[in-house]
Each structure stands twice: as C-alpha cells, then as structure tokens.
C-alpha cells in the first residue's frame, strides 16, 4: 500500500471514529500513533515529541486562556445588564427595538469578551424573558441572540483568531485588524434584517409599551454611559495596545483580565463563588483546546509525512476551475465540515490540509484567514452541533430547540451572504490593516 493511500485511510478512520462518538482529541492522537507506527516505525514517537514541543513554543497561545478567563469574568460579573436595559429603553418606540438592542449589546460584548458561549448565555438571560413578555417572535428572537453571540468569535479579541494566527502563519495583530470589517458588516446585516422584518410584519417585533420605557432622559443617559464604560475601557486597554504594536496579545489579555476583575468588583457584581466558577470553566476549556492542538498537530505531521497532504493539494489544483472557483470549493468544504465539527477541530485539523492549495494559487494569506474566520462563525449556527442553540436553551428553557434551530437557520443564510460579500470585495477585510500598518 502506498503511503499516500495510508494517509487517506487515516483520514477516513478519523471520520468513522468521530461519527461513532469517540472523543476527537484522543481519537486523533491514537490513530496518528497507530498509522504513523505502521508507516515509520519508532520515528513516529520522535515526530510526536518534536511537534508537541513546537506547539508549546507558540507564545501567543498563552493569550487563549487569558481571553477565555476575561470572557467568563464578564459573564459571571454581569457587566452587560445596564447597557442592554438602557438600549431597550432608548429604542423602545421602534419596531424590532429589542432585536437591535440584543445585536448591538452582543457586538459590544463580543469585542470585550471574545467568546461565544459567554455572550449567548449573558444576552439570553437578559433578553429572552423581555422578548417573551413583549410578544416577540420566538424564532427570530432566538436567531438574533445566537447570531449576535456568534460575533464574539469573529470580532477581536477573538480566541479563535489567536489560535488561527500561528496555525495559518498570519500575525495575530493583522488578523485582528482585518476582522473588524467583516464582523461589523455581519452585525449590520443582522440588524437590518430584523428591523426590516419587523417593519413588514409588526407582530414579529412590536414596540415596547410606553409604561415599560417611562424613564427620565437623565437616568437613561446615566445607565447608557455606565453600561458602555466597562466595554469601552476593556477595548482601549486590550485591543488598543495590540493594534498599535505596543503589546503582544498575551500581555494585553493579562491587562484585560485584571481590568475586568477590578471593574466587576467596583460594580459589586462579582462574588467569590462566581470568581471560582470562572477559573474552573477557563481551566476546563483551555486544557481541552490545548490537548486538541497537540493531538491535531501530531495528526497533521503524520498525514503530511505520508505524502497525503501533497496529493490533496495537487488534486485541488488540478480541478478545471479558476482560482476563485477553487477558493469557493474550499469554502464550501469547510462550511460543510462545520456542521459536525467545532471550530477548534477545523482550525487544527482541516485548515492545514487545504491551506497549501490556496497558497499555491498566490491568494493573500490574510484575506484567506479572514474568509476562514467568517466561515467558521457559521459552525455555531449549523446543525446538528450548533452549540449556540444549547447555550441559549440552557438559559431560555421556554423556547423549544426546534424554534431555536429554525431561527438560527435564517441567520446562517445571512452569514453565508456576508461571507460571499467579503469574498467579492476583499477590501472589506483588508483596508484597515493596510491603512493601519501600510501593508
């Protein structure tokens, strides 16, 4: 049997094992060692150690647990309620006002936290009961909350972008700068969609009754200011130094954690129990992600040394399509893989398999990384995994999973439209890093 064929058997065995229900990280490691030993003998163990050390030397990955911790502190500390309720009062007379408040709040929270689970949970806790009482559509409400929450994985300081940078050979600061345009584009598309639907059919998002928004202008301005202040400060102290080259993502993340903790204490919204919960959740998620990073790196090394990666690249390049057509095929493939797999698996396992073909076409690696990031945002809304649905269901038990999934489906279509727009107009993602760094 040729080494290339053995590599594709390794990939097939991985799919079979995952769909059979085996844990992804352990499956990757076990299959890599078994197939690698069959092909190379003892060398596979030296190869595994070498690539494990290589991952451990990626200093930027230290920022991952820090940003995760910051997101959980924001969630546990409850620093979003004031902003949401102020926007709710301010926009109350407009049809679909709660949709706008949800999406704006989720966008701001995504900039501050960089995680999806925390954003969906916090916004769901705040918004779902209010939307039910106001008579809003359960499906459109669930779609707005989950889609808005998914923006946290795309808009900096996204944990996914920190991971993608070293894996794709793109500086994290460039990736941060390039992700603002697509992130705000998607947020705008979501807001326009919900408002348009509410204007066409007012039953989907009726204005709030006057008695629920009877707040003096001075009090409203105070609540809006206090709601925006924590996130404005966090944005300045974390993203500002990163984008200006004054600090690494790791250093800025550390400052962000300290700033979040101080503000939560000042607002008196963070208890010792909540702090311990944030620490535990951060440790669990970070350890899982790093173990997956090590296992997938070993898997990729074995797959590459078998020659299967080269064969896959040559197959993609041999397709009778122009470069943009091949890019569309790759995007479609990654989108479909996002249905059964979460973004860490896609970043660690599948992106390294298709990236060589894209690089051979002389496509801008930063633009490709941005397209991949926008694509992977859909993984939180695509069944059967659709993790955002379960985050929301946990905090909004009155909504059925059927309604949540149907609501998410229309926003997933909107995200694909946004992805196509970024593909057709690359400057949406590239203008800011070009202007900021003169590249």
Image (cartoon, rainbow, N blue to C red):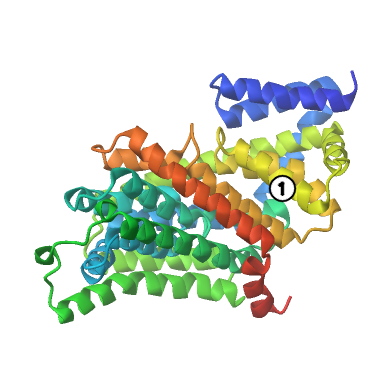
Residue 264 on image: x %, y %:
29, 64
User: Along the horizontal axis of the image, is 174 left or right of 5?
Assistant: left
- Which image quadrant for residue 113? bottom left
3 over 407 or under it: above or below: above
**Residue 4 in view of the camera:** yes
Quarter holding the C terminus is: bottom right
Q: Residue at x 16, y 77 (%)?
A: 219
Q: Residues within 10 Å of mark 1 (few under 14, many from 20)?
A: some
User: Along the horizontal axis of the image, is 430 left or right of 258?
Assistant: right
SS for dot 1? helix
Q: Residue at x 39, y 74 (%)?
A: 233
Residue sitting nearer the eye, 315 or 125: 315
Quarter holding the N terminus is: top right
- Which image quadrant for residue 290? top right
**Residue 157 in view of the camera:** no
Q: Residue at x 26, y 67 (%)?
A: 94
Residue sitting nearer the eye, 416 or 165: 416
Residue 305 on image: x %, y %:
85, 35
Instruction: Say which residue label 1 marks.
Output: 328
Q: Residue at x 46, y 61 (%)?
A: 187
């Amino acid at each position: 049997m040729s080494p290339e064929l053995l590599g594709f058997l390794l990939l097939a065995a991985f799919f079979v094992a995952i769909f059979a229900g085996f844990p992804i990280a352990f499956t990757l490691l076990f299959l890599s060692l078994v197939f690698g030993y069959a092909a190379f003998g003892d060398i596979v163990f030296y190869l595994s150690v070498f690539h494990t050390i290589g991952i451990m030397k990626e200093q930027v990955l230290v920022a991952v647990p820090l940003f995760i911790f910051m997101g959980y502190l924001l969630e546990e500390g409850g620093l979003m309620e004031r902003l949401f309720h102020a926007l709710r009062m301010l926009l109350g007379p407009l049809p679909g006002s709660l949709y706008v408040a949800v999406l704006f709040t989720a966008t701001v929270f995504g900039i501050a936290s960089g995680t999806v689970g925390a954003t969906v949970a916090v916004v769901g806790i705040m918004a779902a009961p209010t939307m039910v009482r106001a008579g809003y559509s359960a499906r459109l409400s669930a779609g707005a909350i989950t889609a808005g929450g998914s923006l946290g994985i795309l808009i900096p300081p996204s944990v996914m972008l920190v991971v993608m940078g070293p894996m794709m050979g793109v500086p994290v600061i460039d990736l941060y700068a390039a992700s603002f345009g697509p992130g705000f584009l998607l947020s705008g598309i979501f807001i326009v969609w919900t408002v348009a639907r509410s204007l066409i059919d007012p039953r989907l998002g009726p204005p709030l009754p006057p008695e629920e928004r009877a707040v003096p202008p001075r009090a409203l301005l105070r609540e809006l200011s206090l709601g925006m202040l924590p996130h404005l400060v966090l944005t300045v102290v974390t993203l500002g130094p990163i984008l200006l080259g004054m600090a690494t993502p790791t250093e800025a993340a550390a400052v962000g954690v300290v700033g979040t903790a101080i503000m939560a204490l000042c607002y008196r919204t963070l208890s010792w129990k909540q702090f311990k919960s944030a620490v535990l959740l951060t440790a669990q998620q970070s350890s899982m992600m790093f173990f997956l990073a090590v296992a997938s790196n070993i898997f990729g090394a074995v797959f590459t040394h078998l020659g299967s990666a080269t064969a896959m690249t040559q197959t993609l390049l041999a397709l009778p399509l122009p470069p943009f057509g091949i890019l569309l095929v790759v995007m479609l493939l990654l989108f479909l893989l996002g249905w059964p797999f979460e973004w860490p698996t896609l970043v660690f396992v599948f992106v390294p398999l298709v990236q060589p073909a894209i690089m051979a076409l002389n496509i801008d690696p930063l633009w490709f990384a941005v397209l991949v990031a926008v694509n992977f945002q859909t993984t939180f809304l695509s069944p059967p995994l659709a993790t955002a649905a379960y985050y929301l269901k946990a905090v909004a038990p009155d909504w059925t999973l059927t309604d949540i999934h149907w609501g998410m489906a229309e926003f997933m279509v909107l995200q694909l439209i946004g992805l196509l727009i970024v593909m057709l107009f690359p400057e949406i993602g590239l203008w800011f890093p070009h202007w900021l760094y003169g590249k």
